[in-house]
Image (tube, grey):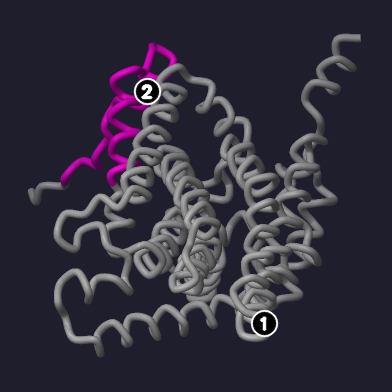
Amino acid sequence: MNSAASSASHPPPLSTRAAAIRAASLARGTSSAPLVSRGGELRTNDTESRAFIQLRGARTACVVAAAFSILVHTLLAHGVVVGSFWCPLSLCAEMCDEPAALTDSLRWQRRVLAAICLMLDFGVIATHWLMPVHPKFVVVKSRRRVMRAHLLSGSLQCLGGPAFFAALYGGGPAAARAVCVALAAVGFGLHVPGALYLLTSAFGAVRIMIPGFLYATSAYAYSLGKLLTATDARLEHDFLSYWLVLHVYAMNRLVFALLTRFNLLASARYTLSILIGLAIAMPAALGWASFAFCVCAIVVFNLAFLAAADEAGSRHRAPLALPPVAHPS
């Protein structure tokens, strides 16, 4: 009886699912090793990450980091400027009295990066819909449903990019705004709640990933809000900002694939992929200071966590032990 109850509360490993993931990895030709060996931090136990989020210090830190992220983007939304510190890329030239050629250069850099994101969409969407997801996303029914809704909303938004430009240059700003309203409905209705729900099952170094995801979700919501209130003159600019924030994940996947292909930094591969992806997409979307504020959100989270951590989280206070130094005899 006790054995049956234990089996019910602790389901056996999804060996079939893991085998499917390994087979998919082999089919892509990425490596002959299992996924958990290549991914480094992907070995993070789902139970451990969920246990971390239950710590009092972690919950307090989430609230503080979320408040900081909301404050930053609220100030941005109300046009607070300190020199060129807050300015989006395509406005820096006007604010700093730089030549118009610089503005054009920055605008084209954003367009080229947006086009690269569109090309990455084909691989990312195909991977998500055709390849098995990590077992932790399917072991719980509610998480499986949220993951499917999240994939659906992300895929619809990727299709929204071509639809927006077709509407803008074929039917004018009014038609493009209709696309923006539809994207905002999908984003606020499905994507933001799904991202916050999946936050509790983060991979990698959770004390970096959780505040990073909170900040990125806040930036995504901010960019959607700006898109809805954009003037006709700024409609394309604000759409590109939203598009680049949306594609932070595509950049993460690209960086992770490259690090995996060359077998680099396995012990911190996932965390570094997230940070590098943010560093590529966020400054192009919202200005160079956006990634600096992301780092600030991570610092604020950890300060709040360590200040509020109870005895259960005390092990996170201890510094990492350094290996002993060998002295020559």
Range drawn in magenta: 296-325
Judge from the rendering whether residue 307 lies leftward or rightward of residue 47; answer left or right: left
Judge from the rendering whether residue 12 lies leftward or rightward of residue 204; answer left or right: right
Q: Is 122 drawn above or below residue 22 in the view shown?
A: below
Q: CA distance from mark 1 to mark 2?
A: 54 Å
Residue 105 percent location from the top left of the image: 31, 87
Which of 210/269 is in front? 210
Q: Is 194 drawn above or below residue 307 in the view shown?
A: below
Secondary element type, mark 2: helix
Dominant secondary structure of the magenta stretch?
A: helix
Q: Which residue is mark 1?
A: 166
Q: Is residue 300 magenta?
A: yes
Crowding at mark 2 (Cα within 10 Å: few <14, some 14-19, many 20+): few
Of callouts 1 and 2, the N-terminal one:
1
Q: Is 247 drawn above or below residue 58 in the view shown?
A: below
Q: Given the current orientation, which residue lies at the most extreme bottom position?
A: 101
